[in-house]
Amino acid sequence: MADHNETPGTSPAGAWIQVAAGLKNPAMRKLLGQVLTGQDPEQEAAGARRAKDLARWEQIGLLRLGAGGTWELNEQLLADTLAAAGTAKADRSGINRFFTGTKLHTLPAKPADRLQVMAYLRDAVIDGDEQLREEQLNERLRVFHPDTALIRRYLVDHGLLLRAADGSSYRRGDRLPEA
């Protein structure tokens, strides 16, 4: 994935949520610091975890392999994310009326509105084929609302997230909100 715009399921507006979740993880934060300071993260400490973290940063779109085969910051993602945030601030229609900045301040009473808000949250916190443990999902949802159990329950109830039978993980559901 050489360019953020080719990353399926990650919108510029929602990408910062995944960046923030990555920064909350100490190992991913250290890895990003190594890339930003010009160190070769793959050379310093090889391993499956490091490779997984690099792949996650690449999937988010914040890092990409440069022409010389070294990891680099995707400046375009930052520009796109800031532009999307500026647009979202000005728009107080649609689902934006339920948010103050990034925080969901009101859960819509109307089922159609609630479905739209939940679809937005789902798209912001989980990519198409990604599978998250409950604590990972909570970490991302907490950016929007402190009651992660409630939001998780709504996401599952609306068919936007599917919970593994043993409760160990979540993945995207197939339901799309009606226009």
Image: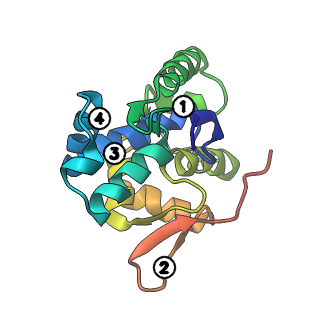
Q: Is residue 144 visible from the viewing direction of this image?
A: no
Q: Where is 134 relative to 104, above or below?
A: below
Mark 2–mark 3 Cα distance, whole angstroms, equals 22 Å
Q: Tell me the mark number nearer the camera, choosing from 2 and 3.
A: 3
For label 3, the residue is 21
**Residue count near mark 2 (Cα–Cα under 10 Å), binned few <14, some 14–19, many ≥20:** few
Residue at mark 4: 35
The residue shown at (38%, 39%) is 19
Looking at the image, is mark 1 or mark 3 earlier in the sequence? 1
Question: Which of the two labelled residues, at mark 3 and mark 4, occupies the earlier sequence position?
Answer: 3
Give left or right: position of 157 versus 27: right
Query: Disc 4 marks which amino acid?
Result: Val
Residue carrying label 2: 164
Element class at badge 1: helix
- What residue do we see at 51% from left, 37% from top? 14
Q: Farthest residue in the front direction?
A: 68
**Distance CA(mark 1)–CA(mark 2):** 28 Å
First-in-chain label (4 vs 2): 4
Residue hosting label 1: 13
